[in-house]
Every structure is written in structure tokens, then in C-alpha cells.
Amino acid sequence: MKLNFYIKAFSTIFLIIVFISSAALAGPTDVVSVALDVEPTTINILETKIGVDIVMQHMHEGLMTSDPVTGDLEPILAGSITIMPNGKDIKVTLEKNHKFHTGDPVTAHDVKWTYEQAVSPENAHLVAASLEEIEDIEVIDNYNLIFHYYEPFAPWPENMWIGICSKNYFEKVGREKFRAQPVGSGPFRFVSRKIGENIIMEANEGYAYPENLYDSTQTKIIKRNASRKKVDFKTLKFFIVRDPITRLAMLETGELDLVYGLLPHDAKRIGLKPDIKVKKTSNVPSFFALATKPLLYPIMQDFKFQMALTHAINRQEIIDKVFLGEGYPMYMYASKSELGYDPTVKFEFNPDKARKLVKESSYKPGDPIILTWTNAVPSSEIIAPIIQKYLRDVGITVQLQQLEAGVQATYSRNKDRREGHMTLYTWAGGRDPQTRIILTVPSDSSYTSYPGRPSKDILDKLVVQQQRELDPQKRLAVLKKIHAILTKEPSSVPLYGLNQIYAMRTKIDYTWTPKSAFPFNLTRTKISK
């Protein structure tokens, strides 16, 4: 009997060991759920329309990707990238170990095809205008290609993050299936999408992401791809939750693991929960301002009146009282994480000086200045009346107008006077100022509100010059000249930037990628054991 007992006991222990071993070999089973406050317009990376669509990049790899520590673009699909002696051509050599989820290798032919699709009007890609700078893409062989630009193009790295797609897969399944069932070569595979509800991906078991080694300051990479690590969890779920209160409630109940873009008072409350941790960073694109309309309203061409607006608004008080100190004043047309931002540019809050400037300007007391606000700007229903009071205190009559965000955008694009004299708006930008500048600054640009600036000819030339200047220091010098003109002949009143505040369940640990407006590098999320 004892022998039978030991045999049974041994068998049970053996089965438990086998079960545990099998579970370990099966890989991670954890789910990480992330809230999106806006529905992506597409899951097809070739048709990226708005910023949030870029979360689909988790299924893809680009030639370059955002480094998780520095936020700068670093090679990922590319083994090397070289600027050719003429300054116009960029040679790319691909690494040879990357495969699509179909098993096909990622080749130079796929890269060329992807860029041709992204620039096609049929897809209307978010960065198609920037890709127009590329004259041709020459495939040398399966792993080497050259981007031929018309002229030297300083922001060329910003054209290198586009998720590469499989030409073979597209030709095999056709456009509609490609749009509904995308494949990439990235760390996650597409599983499903329910419009208005969620997008589900699963870890690509064959994928291991690169780990870089940094110097002691943790700001400079001294060795790339020193080792590779696998994703620490199995399933990545994006839930579309538009209401901020609902997002926080779902985080508290465990239905969500990560939420971002928190307002400070919400972060303060949720941070008191023992199973939730809150993080924040200021090294992200953030820019809130008053867009003025000099083209439509001559008073906005008056420099003294514009400077009165600048000196009349107590930016720090807005940050402290409305955003509980989770922000910083802004005084120039560039976000804090953007190339060309100069922290030394400042203007004092001085109501007396503002009052004097108003009297010296062409403003007629009592004339209503229309300030438009929309719900696209956080807490705009509070900020607009505060600005109204600041301006009233220096002798400017302000009439508030609320518009639906889409209507305001249409008025702005069409240069419609119904938008009013100025609009409370946000445009975070990114690492490089090219897109922001090219769309809003030149006299013939789509969204310029001051095409008749006195210095428009000089400014137009400087915009082209900064785009062509490949030397970083020389380019910064040109950008400084551009910002000096924008300060002297303004079409906006910069107000403030806000910290990115994000919260997560203690079961995970995630760190925001610097200089990013959306949650990148979720691949590197760690599961707490």
C-alpha cells in the first residue's frame, strides 16, 4: 500500500511539474488594456488620418522608431541610414532578420510600395504632404534602397517612422481585406476591431524588441540593439472610452490598465488609490494658445494691441488655479519638446503695460473682440471666461462664443469671419517643427491667418531655408530668425503647455516615451510579478 501511495504521490507531483512547465513554455497570458479617448479613423496604417491612428504602429515597424528613453528617432527596420554627398539622397540598408506576420521577409520592395501608397491621394495619409518632398525611391536590391529628394530636406527622419506593409499580402488579398485584416512586422498581430468599442492585438511570439545601452546621463545611446527582449504580456487591448469619468471608473474597477491625458484634479484623486499609480512628464508636445485673425480683422495686425494681449494674461495663475500647477507658461510658437523651442523667450505679466498699449493702439474702447472656444481644448469653458476677465481689466471688451470643434475647424480652414477675432486652440506639434511651420507660416500656406505680414517675403525664404539646412546648429539659427519675426508680427498669443499625466494599475509598469503625444512603446510595458 505504501508503494502505491508513493507512486500516486509521485505521479501527482510529476503532473503538476509538467503542467507548470507547459504553462511557462506557452508564454505570457496577461492582458494590458489601454483607453483611447478618440476612435481611430482606421486600422490601416497606410490611411493614417489623425494622430491617434498612430497607435496602429504597434502592429508595424518603420525604418525608424521613437527611442523609449530619448524620444528621438532611431533605426529599427533599417540597419543603417546614410545621407549621400549631394545632401539630397538618403541611402537605407535594411536589417535582414525582419519578417511580416505572414512569414514573408521585409524587403526594400515593400518599403518602396508602402511609401507609394502613403503618398497616394487615394489613401490621404497624415504625412503625405511631407512625402511629396521625395522625388523617387530607388530599389537597389532586396535590402538596399535610396530615397531621392528634390532638394536637401532637413526633417527627413520624420518621414521614416511610417509602418511598412507587405506588398505581397496586399496583392494577394486585395484592398478591402487588407483594410479589415492588416498585417505588419511589428511586436503585435491584429486580432479584431469593434468600431466604437475596442481594437485587440496579440503579441507576435517571434518578435523581440531591441534594448539600447545609454551613457551615464541616460540621454545618449552608446550601443544599439545590445540585446533583444520579448513582450511581457500576450494581449493588447485598446478600448474607445470618450468620457473621462468613465475612463477613470474603468481604471478603478480594473477594466482598464492604463489611461492618459488626465486632468490634474482627476489625477490627484485617482492617485490616492492603493492599486493605482500616477506618473507625469513635461517632455511631450503641448501647446495652447489664442489664434488671432489678422487677415479677417485689421485690429489684430496692430502690434501694440497684440502685445497688450500678451502682457494682460496671467499664464502662471491659470496653470496654478485651473491645472493645479501641472503645466508651464508658453511665450513662443513652439511646444517644449520641439526643435527650435527657446526657454529664454519670456514676456512679463504686466496689466499696467497692457493698459497703456491698448490706449496707444488702434483699438476703440467698447468694440467687441470675439473669443471663440470649443471642447477640443481641456477646461476651455473655464479658461475662456478667465481670459475675458484679464482683457476686460486692461480695457478690452471680449465677447465669448462657443462653437462645435468641427465647425470651428471649417471656419478656420475657409478663413470665415464667423470664427471671430481669436480662438482658444491647441496644436501639440511633435519633435520637428516642419509640419507646423509649413502649414501655417508661409504667406501661401493652407492655414495661415496672416498672409500679409510686413516681413512675409523674408519669412517665406526663411521657411524654405530651414527646410533645406542639414546642419542642425545652422538650422536652429534659421528657426530662431523665424520665431523672432513671429514674435514681432504675431498671429497667435501663446499661453501654456501641460504635463502629460497618466495612470495605471499597479499590475503593470509603463513609462511614457519622451516627445510623444500618444502612448508609444507599449511593447515595453512590464507585468508586475
Image (cartoon, rainbow, N blue to C red):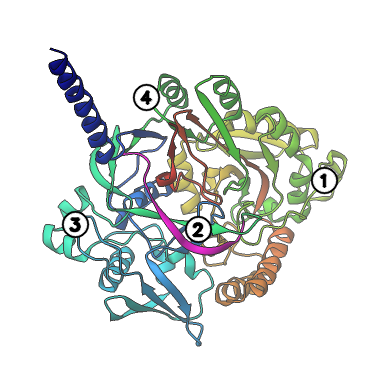
Residue flagged by tag 2: what amino acid is it? Answer: Asn
Which residue position holds label 3?
102
> Residue 31 in the image: x percent, y percent?
33, 33
Q: Give yes or no for residue 221 being in the magenta stretch.
A: yes
Q: Residue at x 27, y 56 (%)?
A: 184
Circle nearer the viewer, 2 or 3: 2
Residue flagged by tag 3: what amino acid is it? Answer: Thr
Secondary structure at badge 1 equals: loop
> Residue 425 in the image: x percent, y percent?
57, 43
Residue flagged by tag 1: what amino acid is it? Answer: Glu
Q: Earlier in the sequence, mark 1 or mark 2?
A: 2
Using a 10 Å C-alpha cutoff, classify the residue at mark 4 as few (fewer than 14 neighbours), some (14 to 19) or many (20 or more).
some
The magenta stretch spans which residues?
A: 219-234
Asked if the residue under mark 4 is in contact with the one under mark 2, i.e. CB atoms within 8 Å, the reply is no
Q: Which mark is residue 348?
A: 1
Between the residue at mark 2 and the residue at mark 4, the CA separation in whole angstroms equals 33 Å
Residue flagged by tag 4: what amino acid is it? Answer: Glu
Which residue position holds label 4?
255
> Residue 135 in the image: x percent, y percent?
38, 79
Between the residue at mark 3 and the residue at mark 1, the CA separation in whole angstroms equals 59 Å
529 on left or right of 315: left
